[in-house]
Image: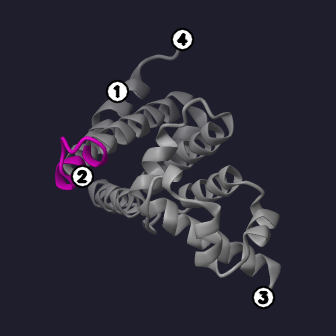
Amino acid sequence: MDPDDRRQQILDRARTMFRERPYGEVSNTEIAAAAGVSRGLLNHYFGTKRELYLAAVAELLSVPPVPVPEYVEGASVRDRVCESVHGWLELLERNQETWLAALGTGGDPELERIVDAARERVVDHIIEVVGLGPVARSRPEVRGMLRGFSGMAEATSSEWLRRGRLTRHQVHVFLEEALVGLLVDIIPRVLDDPQP
């Protein structure tokens, strides 16, 4: 097998196992067996379990939830937001263990860097979905507000997945309404304020 294909095969098996079980319950030996390779070959490609985990998290967080249509003049912001929120929740539900573990980075600078880059991509995705590109580039406060929304989306999703205080439907409604309100009511008011 081509080395890139073999590496991807190992990574795919690791992602599946980390998605199904917490990090501490998965061993390199199990991952190697599931991938049909020796542990030595797994270590050759990834070094340690931690390096493999970081690669799995990075790949998980680099995949957009679902293809959401780019901004089209006259299309409904709510429809695009609804589809985007649905995709976000699908991604989290499919990868619950890995996502929750990634949020609790525990001061791990490499994992925090991976998660922070993913947070920035979420903001980029929102900007693309709602067509705020030119405004977001010229007004950094737009990106700041969307990053704040992203943090709220993480916390709310954690209330659903980790604590069970909310249902998926409740999280969807909350995030959809919050983002539409931010886009329709709050951002325009902030942009109307004179800049210092």
- Could you tell me which quadrant the N terminus lies in? bottom right
Question: Which tag, 1 or 2, sits closer to the chain's start?
Answer: 2
Q: Is label 4 in a helix, a strand or a loop?
A: loop
**Residue at mark 4:** 196
Relative vertical location of residue 172 with respect to residue 86 in this rendering, above or below: above
Does the image show residue 125?
Answer: no
Question: Which tag, 1 or 3, sits closer to the chain's start?
Answer: 3
| Measured Cα–Cα span from mark 1 to mark 4 | 15 Å
Contact check, label 3 and label 4, Cβ < 8 Å: no
Residue in the foreground of this view, choosing between 88 and 93:
93
| Measured Cα–Cα span from mark 3 to mark 4 | 60 Å
Q: How many marks?
A: 4
Amino acid tagged 1: Arg
Question: Which tag, 2 or 3, sits closer to the chain's start?
Answer: 3
| Measured Cα–Cα span from mark 2 to mark 3 | 42 Å
In this rendering, position of residue 38 left or right of residue 186:
right
Residue in the foreground of this view, choosing between 33 and 108:
33
**Residue at mark 1:** 189
| Measured Cα–Cα span from mark 1 to mark 2 | 25 Å
Mark 1 Cα within 10 Å, few/some/many (few <14, many 20+)?
Answer: few
Amino acid tagged 4: Pro
Occupied quadrant, residue 187: top left
Across and down, in percent, residue 10 comes to 66, 72
Q: Is label 3 in a helix, a strand or a loop?
A: loop
| Measured Cα–Cα span from mark 2 to mark 4 | 36 Å
Amino acid tagged 3: Met
Q: Is label 2 in a helix, a strand or a loop?
A: helix
